[in-house]
Amino acid sequence: MPEPVASFAEILALLPELPGPDLESATKAAAREAQLTKPAGALGRLEEISGWMATWQGAHPARINRPRVAVFAANHGIAARGVSAFPAAVTAQMVQNFVSGGAAVNQLCTAFDAELRVYEMALEKPTADFAAGPAMDEGECARAIAYGMMAVEPGIDLLCLGEMGIANTTSASAICIGLFGGTAEDWVGPGTGVAGEAMARKKAAVDLAARLHFAEKRKPLDVLARAGGFELAAIAGAILAARLARVPVLLDGFACTVAGAVVQALDPRGLDHCQVAHMSAEPGHRRLLERLGRKPLFDFGMRLGEASGAALAIAVVRGALACHNGMATFADAGVAGKD
């Protein structure tokens, strides 16, 4: 693992170190896929997933022996503007629910034999209100990125990322404006279920922040610092560390994918080791995935966060590898192949 970083310059210095795809493993996966007892392409995206796993683990056959679900939790100063259906205190309450085993992600981790880690990020100290000034200074943002990098420990072979933070869809929407342009009308959705006056407050806060911070184009890490949250910065750090360690990543919904968008803005190939697990019901997520050129693994209308979609996608990846690694080849089964 790299040493903890404390400045944007140190983060940017990591980018040239990001490994590319392992083409030897990718070739081996493609060669085996072509010999399996099925018509070419018959398993659709499962074939793509097994190849992706081999390519980014740098090994064939790829395996899932130790998947980790990492949920980063933090509070946002913007919550004080009444942009969420829930008070900021719910972040800490949900963290306790994770610890007690009562959340949806706990059940999914149990079902799919995944290790759950919850990273509580100074919940008593929210980011600053980004509609009044930057959410974080450079040091705070860089340290949050470094904290996220520590989630990638030796032995992990699949990393599922998610978040918990009241008002973080407000933050995510503002980051989208900073990265891609537009207005609150383009990016803001109901989040935890806001409507009416609360939705109006949410859009107003994001538009105010956009005028304050993004009247001119800014660099990706500056966008993250000005409108982001500690948990979103940590997710960006975890994505970078996973790439350095050759660990494939499953991203959860809107807020998590926004953190990934910052990485892709830093390096156009920075998310190649990632799959977006699902299409969130949050309307900005579809628009964001179009901008990123990404297709999620499934769309179940989920909008819970807490890495629930990413944890569920473990089952899809396990299924893809089970087929790729366990199916007989035409030669093994004595089945005639295609002429």
Image (cartoon, helix red, strand yellow):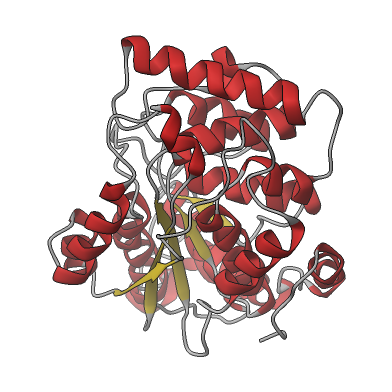
- State which quadrant residue 184 falls in: top right
Q: Residue at x 69, y 81 (%)?
A: 4
168 left or right, relative to 95? right
Where residue 100 sits in the image (x, y, percent)?
Answer: 14, 69
316 left or right, relative to 149? left
| Up/down of 110 relative to 228, above or below | below
Q: Residue at x 52, y 90 (%)?
A: 154
Q: Is residue 339 visible?
A: no
Residue closer to the observer: 65 or 258: 258
Where residue 249 sits in the image (x, y, percent)?
Answer: 52, 63
Q: Residue at x 44, y 12 (%)?
A: 200
For the N terminus, the image quarter is bottom right
Q: Residue at x 50, y 80 (%)?
A: 61
Extreme residue in the bottom direction: 154
186 left or right, relative to 92? right
- The mark tally for this picture is 0
